[in-house]
Amino acid sequence: MKKIISMAIVTLSALAATSANAGGGGNCHFHGHAPVKEAVIVGCASERKAALADNGKIDASWKSISLDKVETVEGKKMKELKLSFKNPAEKDASKQTLYMFYSLTGNFIAANFTGM
């Protein structure tokens, strides 16, 4: 009986671990197939946007820009979340909207100014 209970506990622990995400410290890497709450993805996108600015990939003015909208779109392989950030201070009109794409399970796919 103890052996069965021990095996059940180990199995449940393994299942719980595969659906958990790596937490804290800017870690936004997820495992499993369960969709992640939109608010979590928005937080991860904000962290990634700040990292892009810190690394010089985008202008530092993007760090203070808030989310404009979130859409579910059909990606190349699956549905994705498309997050839009608008920066009216950007002089180049073609770069006034930053798009970030995430899988519904929370993993970052891409960031660009084209929305494609």
Image: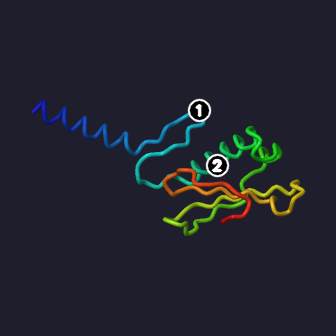
Crowd around label 2: few <14 · some 14–19 · many ≥20 (10 Å) = many
Figure coloring: rainbow
Q: In x, y percent, where is residue 72?
A: 58, 66
| Callout 2 amino acid | Ala
Q: Tell which of 10 and 98 is nearer to you.
A: 98
Residue 33's tag is none
The secondary element bearing badge 2 is classed as helix
Question: Quarter of the image holding residue 63?
Answer: top right
Residue occupying the far left of the picture: 1
Residue plotted at (75% across, 45% down): 57
| Callout 1 amino acid | Gly
1 or 2: tag closer to the N-terminus = 1
Q: In x, y percent, where is residue 13?
A: 31, 37
Residue 45's tag is 2
Q: Is residue 9 above or below residue 62?
A: above
Left or right, 36 with reference to 26: left
Would you name the residue on which mark 1 appears?
25
Does the residue at mark 1 contact the one at mark 2 (Cβ under 8 Å)? Answer: no
Residue plotted at (32% across, 43% down): 15
